[in-house]
Image (spheres, rainbow, N blue to C red):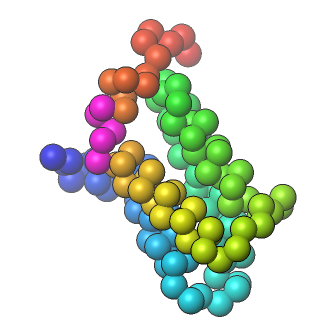
Amino acid sequence: MISNNKILSKKNLTKFSLIVALLLCLFDMPYWYFQLFRIFGTIGFVYLAYLDYKSSFKITPQLYIACAIVINPILKISFDRDTWDIVDLILSIILIATIFFEKQIIKYLSIPNRKK
C-alpha cells in the first residue's frame, strides 16, 4: 500500500497530472490541447527523468527521456490519430506502473553505492 506522503509527493503529483492529460488526449479535444500537452508533457517527463537520475535509477530516466522525445513539440513525430491513442495509453500505463510498483523498480533497477 502507498502511504499518503508518497501519494502527495511532487513526483507522484507530476505523474498523476500526466496520466490525466494523457487520458484526456483519448477524447476529441481541440488541436491546441494537443500542442499544449506536447509542451507540458515534455517538461513533465524531463522532470521525472531528472528526479529519477538523482535517485540513482538506471533505466527509468532513459524511459522518461524516450517518452519526452516521442511527445516533444520541437521535432514532432507524426502518427495518425489511432496510433497516438495507443501511444497515450502505453505512456499512461507506464506512469501508473511506476507509481504502484515503485518499490520493485527501485529494487531491480537502482545502482548500488553510486557516488555523488
Residue 100, image x, y percentages: 29, 47
- 31 vs 71: above or below: below
Quarter assignment of residue 53:
top right
Q: Which corner quadrant of the image does residue 39 belong to?
A: bottom right
Residue 102 highlighted magenta (yes or no): yes
Q: Assign the C terminus to one quadrant of the image.
A: top right
| Residue, far right | 75
Q: Is residue 22 left or right of residue 42?
A: left
Which residue is at the front of the view, 18 or 84? 84
23 or 16: nearer the viewer: 23
Query: Is residue 49 shown left or right of residue 80?
Result: left
Q: Can the viewer see residue 71 in this picture?
A: yes
Q: Residue at x 33, y 39 (%)?
A: 102
Horizontally, is 84 left or right of 111 in the view? right
Query: Relative to 38, does residue 81 appear above or below in the rendering?
Result: below
Q: How many marks?
A: 0
User: Is residue 78 on the magenta stretch?
Assistant: no
Indicate the position of residue 4 as horizontal and vertical percent values: 21, 53
Residue, far left:
1
Q: Quadrant of residue 74?
A: bottom right
Image height check: is 46 above or below 33? Answer: above
Rendered residue at 64%/56% (across/down): 43
Q: Position of residue 93 (x, y in %)?
A: 42, 56
**Residue 60, horizontal then vertical, whole percent:** 51, 36
**Which residue range is magenta in the image?**
100-104
The answer to whether residue 36 shows anywhere in this view is: no
| Residue for point 45% across, 60% down | 92
**Picture residue at 69% right of the left edge, 55% below the top:** 70
> Which secondary structure type mostly characterizes the magenta part of the structure?
helix
